[in-house]
Image (cartoon, grey):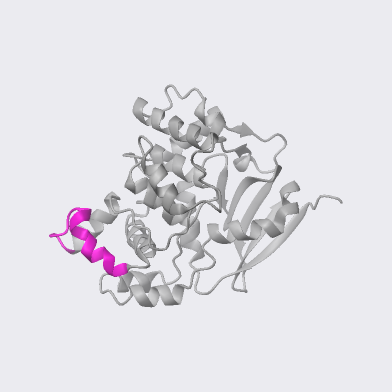
């Protein structure tokens, strides 16, 4: 059977869908060489079941659906790829129901009104997401992106004859990252050790991060036991990779500041918990609205 060259998938969603803000979130965190957001599209090189290809996702100009275009041998797996792409772009969310619930809170009502179709952007790979989370500890989103680009060049693999220069690299595999030379990469030694220790744990299978059958409660505990990984990282991964709608990265500085700005008596997460528990079971979406408010105001990626 011949390999399909190009396959288009129409993936439906429940309106509204804030596509510009979804792309903005991905753009602020795109891995240089691996991901690119341009001309209203998300693009990246992908690999599935041993086959390589390119994924492009756009919003349909008329229908309530996203259009995922698969090029190359990976297009043979279009049916299997429908689920991970849908998860990545949060297509199963019901924004009206979530928005109605959150809008009952006077703090969140104006934020929901300003961005009624806000989604929780996911991730192509939980491994990539944790790598970024570790790299991003105590640095800005921009600085983390710069370091991630260096990691790709040192431990990733360039795709020969790739048609799209900005996505012509494969993200490092866990095994490659675990043994890469990361001297002078721009991170403290302890964080490099934590990063490579995590990569080694994934490479050996002791942390089945991207196994759909893995129990996420167990994964949470396993990740927390690794050096250099704390509650923020675990909740962030649960929010974006494991699609937990109630995940809440309580120690995120932007979230803490946003809540304290509304009630100065609530400074630390332990003080804020009773207030944020009112947003259950949709705390991940509340986090997105609070991050989005700051991004709208500052004009730059903040939080997450």
Q: Which residues are magenta?
A: 263-279
**Residue furthest out toward the right:** 1
Q: Give the quarter of the image for residue 276.
A: bottom left
Q: Is residue 117 visible?
A: yes
**How many numbered marks have been drawn onto this rendered protein structure?**
0
Q: Is residue 212 magenta?
A: no
Please tell me which residue lies in front, 278 or 303: 278
Residue drawn at 47 percent across, 59 percent down: 243
| Magenta stretch encompasses residue 265 | yes
Where does the image place residue 71, in percent across and percent down from the top left? Answer: 72, 51
Where is 178 relative to 263, above or below?
above
In the image: residue 26, left or right of residue 166: left
Residue 18 in the image: state x and y as whole percent: 48, 67
Residue occupying the point 20% across, 55% down: 270
The percent position of residue 72, horizontal first and vertical second, equals 74, 48
Q: Position of residue 15 (x, y in %)?
A: 52, 74
Q: Nearer the viewer, residue 225 or 178?
A: 225
In-image side of 202 versus 9 (left or right) = left
Residue at horizontal 62 percent and vertical 74 percent from the top: 63
Instruction: Determine whether 157 is above or below 142 in the image.
Output: above
Could you tell whether 6 is left or right of 101 in the image?
A: right
Do we see residue 153 in this rendering? no
Type of secondary structure dominating the magenta stretch: helix
Quarter residue 226 falls in? top left
The picture quadrant where one finds residue 278 is: bottom left
- Looking at the image, is 186 positioned above or below residue 36? above
């Amino acid at each position: 059977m011949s390999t399909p060259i190009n396959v288009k998938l129409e993936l439906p969603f429940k309106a509204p869908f804030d596509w510009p803000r979804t792309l903005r979130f991905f753009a602020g965190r795109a891995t240089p060489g691996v991901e690119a957001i341009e001309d209203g599209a998300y693009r990246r090189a992908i690999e599935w079941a041993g086959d390589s290809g390119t994924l492009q996702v756009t919003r349909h100009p008329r229908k309530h659906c996203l259009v995922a275009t698969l090029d190359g041998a990976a297009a043979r797996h279009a049916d299997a790829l429908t689920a991970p792409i849908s998860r990545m772009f949060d297509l199963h969310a019901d924004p009206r129901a979530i928005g109605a619930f959150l809008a009952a809170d006077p703090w969140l009502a104006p934020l929901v009104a300003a961005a009624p179709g806000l989604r929780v952007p996911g991730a192509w790979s939980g491994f990539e997401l944790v790598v970024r989370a570790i790299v991003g500890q105590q640095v800005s989103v921009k600085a983390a992106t710069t370091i991630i680009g260096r990691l790709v060049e040192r431990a990733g693999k360039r795709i020969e004859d790739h048609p799209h220069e900005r996505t012509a690299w494969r993200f490092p595999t866990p095994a490659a990252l675990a043994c890469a030379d990361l001297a002078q990469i721009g991170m403290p030694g302890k964080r490099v050790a934590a990063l490579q220790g995590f990569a080694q744990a994934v490479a050996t299978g002791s942390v089945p991060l991207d196994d759909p059958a893995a129990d996420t409660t167990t994964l949470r505990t396993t990740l927390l036991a690794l050096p250099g990984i704390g509650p923020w990282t675990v909740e962030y991964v649960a929010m974006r990779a494991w699609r937990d709608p109630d995940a809440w990265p309580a120690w995120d500085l932007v979230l803490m500041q946003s809540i304290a700005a509304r009630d100065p008596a609530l400074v630390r997460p332990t003080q804020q918990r009773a207030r944020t528990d009112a947003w259950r079971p949709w705390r991940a979406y509340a986090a997105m609205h609070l991050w989005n408010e700051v991004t709208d105001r500052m004009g730059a990626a903040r939080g997450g």
